[in-house]
Image (cartoon, helix red, strand yellow):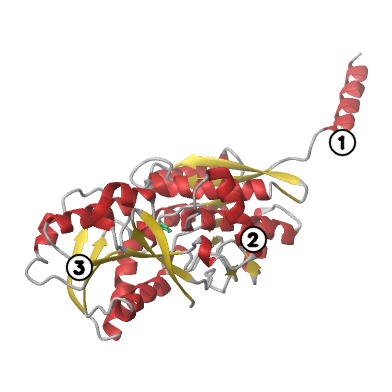
Amino acid sequence: MLGWTMAALLALGLAQEAGSTPPEKIKVGVVLSMTGDTAAFGEQTWAGLQVAKEMKPKVLDREIELVLVDDKSDKIEAAVAAQRVVQRDKVVAILGEVASSRSMAIASVAEAKKVPQISPSSTNPLVTQGKRYVFRACFIDSFQGEVIANFAVDHLEAKTAVVFKDIAQDYSVGLASFFKTTFVKRGGKITQELKYQTGDQDFSPQLTLLKSEPPDVIVVTGYYQEAAQIAKQARGLGLKSVFLAGDGAEAPELVQIGGAAVEGLYFSTHFDEKSATTALGDAYVKAFRKKHQTAPDGLGALGADAYFMLAGAIEQAGSAEPEKIRTALEQLKGFEGVSGVITVDAKHNTLKSAVIRTVKNGEFVYVATVNP
Ligand code: PHE
């Protein structure tokens, strides 16, 4: 009797192996801030990732399954989320985060567990520095700082600048310092350096210091919530300086919160449909507009690029094993992504163009593309 059961079970197993069940899905962890201070970052990135997944749902004939975990805009939660997708879901790679501080928290898990991580949009140099398993789809802040500083000097003819930085964010601190280096090198003068922290609401103590000697430009290197508030309170105090920001300002909330105060603000970012240079970029713009009925942004484009980089690496490796993906990512050269051509260098960074956008009548408008 027992023998018969075994035989039957074996036959069943064999029958399954013979092909009725589809091949196992490739699980990919996605750690993003879907709620909290920077919920817009998670939402925008996820919007782009979904489009990318619809454009390329399978690799090596296996479906990709995205396992999304919300880190609530918190770096400890980000590390916990990374642990969870690796241990519970057995993901072969992690996509995320947007904020550099949170990407670094995830990176410690990626390194320890030997699972590749691709940050779509974390621009602080330290995110990948000295890491074997951490990659990114975007340019870094030494370049971004230079782009903003050159824009201030060449297009805004700024001679004086005040830098406003969020000391709770590695991104903000780094970008402020890179801006300063180039601005000073180009003959500009930093008249004040002001500090705040994520979550702050009242910036009048710092802004009041600028009333006697307002600078040509106020450079806010933090994220959209605080950038919008700073602009609003500055205008409230009668300050007329031009506002300049980095990619962290890019969210619809900048305009929703800042209203008229953010009109004329300039920021650097990674993509605009007018800056698309690749066939994949064009296809993405079409697919994005169709699915979301709005214009694509930098975060979504980079989310898609992180996905396509991973899919490309799996194809190149002919395997979804983490170690093989890691090696293939390291060898990725001249990859025609959505936001431009991606070549992973020895430090796991990539040289890409930046885009300057401005706020005009409550919309983000393309100004220029700056090549490295
Ligand atoms: N570059 C920012 C960081 O490193 C994240 C960001 C990218 C935010 C693009 C908005 C748009 O923290």
Quarter containing the N terminus = top right
| Closer to the eye: label 1 or 2 | 2
| Residue drawn at x 70%, y 56% as measured from the top left | 314
Residue labelled with disc 1: 19
Q: Position of residue 60 (x, y in %)?
A: 77, 51
306 or 317, which lies in front?
306
* Ligand 1 picture quarter: bottom left
| Alpha carbon distance from label 1 to label 3 | 67 Å
Residue labelled with disc 2: 280
> Can the viewer see residue 114?
no
Q: Position of residue 19 (x, y in %)?
A: 87, 36
Q: Residue furthest left?
A: 212
Task: Choose the circle earlier in sequence order: 1 or 3.
Answer: 1
Query: For the residue carrying disc 1, how many other residues have a C-alpha within 10 Å: few (<14), some (14-19), or many (20+)?
Result: few
11 or 367, which lies in front?
367
| Alpha carbon distance from label 3 to label 2 | 39 Å
Q: Secondary structure at mark 2?
A: helix
The amino acid beneath tag 1 is: Gly
Q: Secondary structure at mark 3?
A: loop
Q: Are marks 1 and 2 in contact (CB under 8 Å)?
A: no
> Can the viewer see residue 191?
yes
Q: Residue 157 vs residue 300: left or right?
A: left
Residue labelled with disc 3: 241
The amino acid beneath tag 2 is: Leu
Q: Residue 10 vs residue 349: left or right?
A: right
| Residue drawn at x 64%, y 60% as measured from the top left | 280
Task: Choose the circle earlier in sequence order: 1 or 2.
Answer: 1
